[in-house]
Image (tube, rainbow, N blue to C red):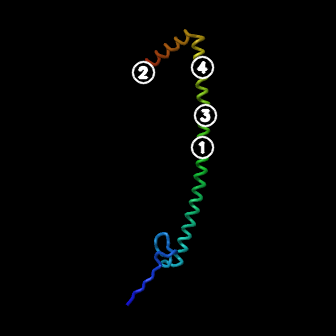
């Protein structure tokens, strides 16, 4: 007496979850294809959204770097201007320094 068993497991029509397509029938196949299509559409949409966000971040970083360069040059100009003022009016610079120190000391004691 010989027992012969044949199953669809391992056949080329096996579902990703490991369930053979013959076990669920055409309804399961249609649902799997539909879900696969939906996942593909979401992946495509997410990919394009990531590209747009990356582009926006790149633009923002470029703008920030430009502003920082502008502020850096403005700071250098301001420091150079202050140095020249101190060279031109040394007594006034010492008086302003003493007055500022006095005001800060009074403010910190209060």
The reply, left or right, for residue 100 in relation to residue 88 is: left
Q: Earlier in the sequence, mark 3 or mark 2?
A: 3
Q: Earlier in the sequence, mark 1 or mark 3?
A: 1
Give the image location of residue 94, x and y in percent. Answer: 52, 11
Residue for badge 1: 58
Callout 3 secondary element: helix
Q: Kindly give the residue lying farthest to the left in the view shown.
A: 1
Measure the C-alpha gap from mark 4 to mark 3. 20 Å
Question: Dots 1 and 4: beta carbons under 8 Å?
Answer: no
Image height of 56 relative to 103, above or below: below
> Measuring 57% from the left and 63% from the top, which residue is drawn there?
40
Query: Looking at the figure, which quarter contains the N terminus?
Result: bottom left
Around disc 2, counting alpha carbons within 10 Å, would you say few (fewer than 14), some (14 to 19), or many (20 or more)? few
The reply, left or right, for residue 41 in relation to residue 98 is: right
Question: Dots 3 and 2: beta carbons under 8 Å?
Answer: no
The reply, left or right, for residue 56 in relation to residue 11 is: right
Measure the C-alpha gap from mark 1 to mark 2. 45 Å
Image height of 46 relative to 19, above or below: above
Around disc 3, counting alpha carbons within 10 Å, would you say few (fewer than 14), some (14 to 19), or many (20 or more)? few
Q: Earlier in the sequence, mark 1 or mark 4?
A: 1
């Amino acid at each position: 007496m010989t027992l012969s068993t044949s199953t669809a497991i391992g056949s080329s029509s096996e579902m990703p979850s490991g369930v053979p397509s013959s076990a669920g029938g055409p309804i399961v196949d249609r649902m799997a294809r539909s879900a696969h299509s939906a996942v593909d559409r979401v992946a495509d949409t997410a990919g394009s959204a990531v590209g747009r966000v990356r582009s926006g971040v790149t633009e923002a970083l470029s703008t920030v770097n430009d502003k920082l360069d502008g502020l850096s040059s403005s700071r250098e100009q301001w420091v150079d201007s202050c140095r020249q003022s101190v060279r031109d009016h040394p007594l006034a610079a010492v008086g302003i320094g003493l007055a500022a120190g006095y005001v800060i000391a009074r403010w910190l004691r209060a």
